[in-house]
Image (cartoon, rainbow, N blue to C red):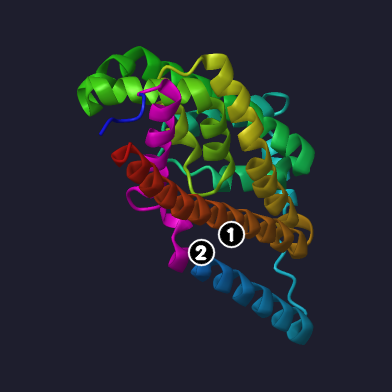
Amino acid sequence: MTSAPDRPADGIRQLEEQLVAGGKPPLLLRRRVVAGIVVAFLVVIAVYWATNQLFGLTYTLEAEPFRRWVDGFGPAGPLVFIGIMALSVLFAPIPNAPIFMAAGLAWGPVLGTLYCMVGLLLGSTMAFWVARRFGRGHLPRLIGKRNAERVDTLVLDIGGRVVFWARMIPAVNFDWVSFVAGMTAIPFRVFITYSALGMLFPTAIAVVAGDGLGRDFRITLAAGGAWVAVVVASAVVFWARRRNGWRGGARNRESTAVD
């Protein structure tokens, strides 16, 4: 018996199969969690509809005091916000969602999204270079030299797609992606380009949700529905890839065992 040729593409494919088929899925991609999110969202819609129809409740916030407070910073207000946004990325445990929604309340969906994106890209750049400067050299010691080489091969081949989907799906923390990417061989221009493309939609959704809190709660519900739809779609794709990846890996192993 002879084994199949050890080509770089084969190694990438095998590593991708391991990433898809092995280990536990991210929390937001697990079946029970996804089902719970969908049910919870439907309950929120039902409660809103019932209380709105029966008692006239609107669930909107009075955004004007917050806007006046932001305006008190003058022209420096957006710069202060962008700095806070960037630091929330650099210090990853700080949640981003409340900051996104605050931007929607303060500046509306367009400027709010713009300021958030500038802050996110600035913070992602800093996090990437911190990891590249101080963490890159430790990667072989953390996961082994051979595994580090395989990871580098993977990110150089499909790194842009990995970064895009890691930014796009709600199951992955924006901030940790920057640190992890910085420890690999992915070029910075690829990282920042696909980061911007991947972060735009979920950031805009969160900002629109914040804007809806100050105008019409139905806008917030619509934004939440879009977020839930992305979670469900991401989960379905992940489950399909996980199943097909496992089957494909089994077929590949069978074909390499027979000559």
Residues tagged 2 and 1 counted as in contact (Cβ below 8 A) = yes
Front one among 95 and 223:
223
- In the rendered structure, which disc, 2 or 1, sits on the residue that comes first in sequence? 2
Q: Is residue 78 above or below residue 173?
A: above
Q: Which residue is mark 2?
A: 34
Instruction: Residue 80: tell me if it is visible.
Output: no
Q: Is residue 126 above or below residue 177?
A: above
Q: Is residue 152 above or below residue 245?
A: above
Q: Which amino acid, by three-letter code, is at mark 1?
A: Val
Residue in view at x 79 percent, y 57 percent: 215
Front one among 16 and 83:
16
Q: Which residues are magenta?
A: 6-34
Indicate yes or no whether the magenta region holds residue 13: yes
Find numbered disc 1 in the image and state the secondary structure of the residue it sits on.
Answer: helix
Q: Which residue is mark 1?
A: 232
- Give the CA distance from mark 2 to mark 1: 7 Å
